[in-house]
Image (spheres, rainbow, N blue to C red):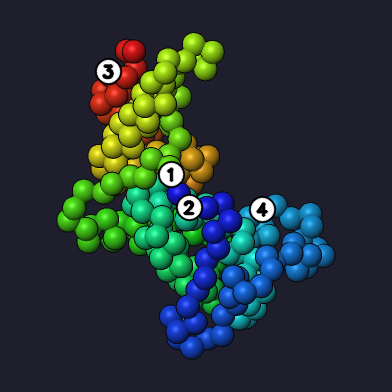
Amino acid sequence: MTSASATIKLPQAAIEATPMPDPRASSPASTDDVSPSASHLSEDDTDVELMQRVAKQDEAAFEQLIERHQHAVIGTVAKMLGNPSDAEDIAQQVFIRIWKSAPRYKPTAKFTTFLFTIARNLVFNESRRRSRKKEYSMDEREDDFHLQTPDPQQARPDQDVLHAELQHAVDQAIASLPEKQRMAVILRRYEGMPYDEISEVLGLSISAVKSQLFRARTTLRETLQQYLNQ
């Protein structure tokens, strides 16, 4: 499982010799580092302001962006690839690209759209590189579709075994979805992303996103029918 306290550590050599902050070697950035005027800004406005500072090679601002978004990026990548170690490696690459692209960044969309579009490209590239079927970590997942489990007060001795079996079935069902359907499900269910933002991340229309989600849910219900009927 990816720990909630996991922190991105960016290798300096990967940033073309540009000095980078090492989040593991310092305390988490304080929100006090944001300019006083940022206290009334929206989340996206704060991200944009930080990116403007990153464009000027402000390492403290970059560390704040990492602190604000690293767990969402790592979690999404882990759910897509099924390997926490791979997830942290890909997440590092995401933030390396954020640093390098900051001078060219234009806030034409939400920062999180920009961020997850980079993550999508890297994840899809990694998925296509692999020839083997992904194995999803049971510890990474929740029951996305609120599948029913026995009431704890009526639990049978084998409840834990049955629940583990159900979790594994959910993992495998989501793992078998086509990559765009899988990404849409993860962004919608785990990140709570609205349809319009998912459409920008995936490069699809809003109606196409809804269609992807509908097909994904239909497939999951069919795949997990034996469990839903218990």
Residue occupied by mark 1: 140
Secondary element at tag 4 = helix
- Mark 1: give few (<14), some (14-19) or many (20+) Cα within 10 Å: some
Residue 107 % position (x, y): 57, 62
As helix, strand or loop, the secondary structure at mark 1 comes to helix
Q: Which residue appears at 29% of the width and 24% of the height?
A: 224
Name the amino acid type tagged 4. Glu
Q: Residue at x 49, y 88 (%)?
A: 17
Q: Nearer the viewer, residue 164 or 22?
A: 164
What residue sits right under mark 2 in the picture?
2
Left or right, residue 131 beside residue 214: left
Q: Residues within 10 Å of mark 2 (few under 14, many from 20)?
A: some
Type of residue at label 3? Gln
Residue 208 makes an appearance in the image: no
The residue tagged 4 is: 43
Instruction: Please report whichever mark, 2 or 1, sits nearer to the chain's N-terminal start.
Output: 2
> At x 35% / y 49%, what residue is drawn?
82
Q: Give me the C-alpha separation between circle 4 and circle 3.
A: 42 Å
